Amino acid sequence: MRYKYLLLLLALLALNTPISAEYFRHIGLSEGLTQPSVMSIHQDQLGRMWFGTREGINLYDGKQITAFKGWCNASNDSAPIWLGNEVSSIVEDKQGNIFFLVDDDIIKFDIQTEQFSRLSKGSRIPVLTSLEGDLWYMRHDSLFKHSSGATESTFMLKTGITSPITCLTMLPNKICIGSHDGIFFYDRSSGKETHVLRGIDIYRIFESSQKELWIGTRMYGLYRINKKGEIRQVPFSPGSPTGISSWQIRDFVEDGERNIWFGTFDGLHKYSTKTGQYSLIQIPKYVGGLNHPSIFSLCKDMQGTIWVGSYFGGVNYFTPKQDSFVHYDYDQNATKNQYYSYIGDIVVDKNEHVWLSTDGGGISCTDKNWNIIHQFTAGGKNSIPHNNIKSICYDEENECIYIGTYLGGLSRYDLQTGQFYNYLERRKGEPNTPNEVVFHVKMWKGKLYLSARNGVFSLDTKTQKFHKLDIPIAYYEDFDIDPEGYLYLSGMFNLVCMHLDKLEASYIPLTQKGYNAKITRILATNNGAYISTLGGGLFFYDKKTHKTAHYTAEEHQLPSNFCYNVCLSPSGNILITSDKGVTSYSPEKKQLYHH
């Protein structure tokens, strides 16, 4: 029946009202992009564009894409290089060699030999940048410089910063380090430290041509620091030219007219230096519009074209002056807030109504004939707290839908009364309650279990009281519970297993050729857990023997090691989706079948 749900994608391709007339061209999966989440962009000296995704590296020469994904050959016949997961930064040295921050390690691409090599291995490097052709990066709390052509890096500064490092910006006269606890400035002559915006999680630091610092934060909006060092927070004022419309600010670029463009969770912002006003581009209703609002990376090339990397829409690019013209709507009857680039959880209630969650369009409810009954979006007195839905589940006994959102926390919708209850708003200030980011929700034996950024919780649906589970690691995105009460959680690169009554955790590392595989989904069964991963194939953890079986493309019939989801079919087979289609696994026959 899930295959039928996919047909709804065709029925829901309607777009929001346009807010700007920028014309965007698009590069996506059909053009050869390995994955639609583009986290970093760079143009090399030859004019080629490099895109870093959550599944490898892409090189675009203006006509076609060359992809580097998974295990790639290295220089000097050394061991293969792993390029499978997130590529968060791309920089270049004076010689034109390209350097990538891949899963917290630095990988070099030699422009002459066109071969990869490792600059670091297992160093847990959080940030990488460049200045005048030299590489700069942090390792723990220390700053290092790697000069062009050098074989070794040079230690430059021990900062003593204890909070996690999030970004690094090198300026001629100062070092700017962003962290979960504000910004640390270091004078490059005297070494003097200045700590500002304490307690604020910094995402990006950018210096404009006017020597003004633009500060993007993860949850606290936009700050500007002028040449005198005066700090001003830009007002949060959605829909107004006097301020911003999103709290999450991720990247910056300046165009030829000195306008500042910045990518946010809710679209692409522009600050006009001529008028002093802010504007916002979201998903519009015309051909050539921005095709995903969640922007992670920006880059201006030599010709002045701005390249935009989105969370789930690939790459958009446009030239600010040339591509600004009026567009024609291609769907005059489009309904507001019914465009979805990604549909997540799907549940069916007892009335055979289908509930679909999306990554930016809220929740849709249809009848069994696919007619839309309800469209729930954020805003208003009785609504969901945020349009980015991470997970939903159905509580049949109490006739309600539980909703986990990104930035809006947990919500509950009562099917009988038609009322929403938003826990973050109603339980504000209560201890041991989930915060604004809820990753996954699941009903099990009358209780709701959920993972949030601040831990894993259970909710008694009768008393509506939360209980925080005593688990050492707090950050889990996905989990599942088997019929016997064994809880399986994804701890980044490890599987965590425990019984809900005992809460004694067992940690099972999932490795392939010495590298950890990022978990994408967990399926708990009577016999154990199936775990799909990015680049590591499929794992099965047997809870009785405590042994782990591993299925890969190299040694089994699995068509690809990049697996996105795993679920149970009505016949009892395990279905695995990957970048090469759907595979079913028969636990009884221990055989894989590719469809």
Image (cartoon, helix red, strand yellow):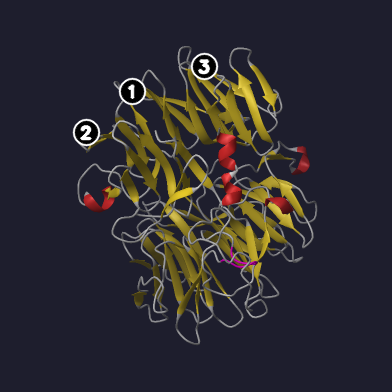
Residue hosting label 3? 547
Tell me the mark number nearer the camera, choosing from 2 and 3: 2
Q: Give neighbour class at mark 2: few <14, some 14-19, many 20+ (Cα, 10 Å).
A: few
Q: Earlier in the sequence, mark 2 or mark 3?
A: 2
**Residues at discs 2 and 1 in contact (Cβ within 8 Å):** no
Q: Give neighbour class at mark 3: few <14, some 14-19, many 20+ (Cα, 10 Å).
A: few
Q: Earlier in the sequence, mark 3 or mark 1?
A: 1
- Name the magenta segment's main secondary structure: loop
| Mark 3–mark 1 distance (CA, rounded to whole Å) | 18 Å
Question: Which residue is drawn at the image coordinates 51% and 21% (left, top)?
Answer: 541
Inspect this view and state whether residue 109 appears: no
Please tell me which residue lies in front, 158 or 508.
508
Please tell me which residue lies in front, 327 or 564.
327
Q: Is residue 421 magenta?
A: no
Residue hosting label 1? 504
Highlighted magenta segment, given as a residue range: 285-290
Label 3 element class: loop
Please tell me which residue lies in front, 327 or 472.
327
Quadrant of res 246: bottom left
Label 1 element class: loop
Q: Residue 536 in the image: x percent, y percent?
A: 61, 32
Residue hosting label 2? 462
| Mark 2–mark 1 distance (CA, rounded to whole Å) | 27 Å
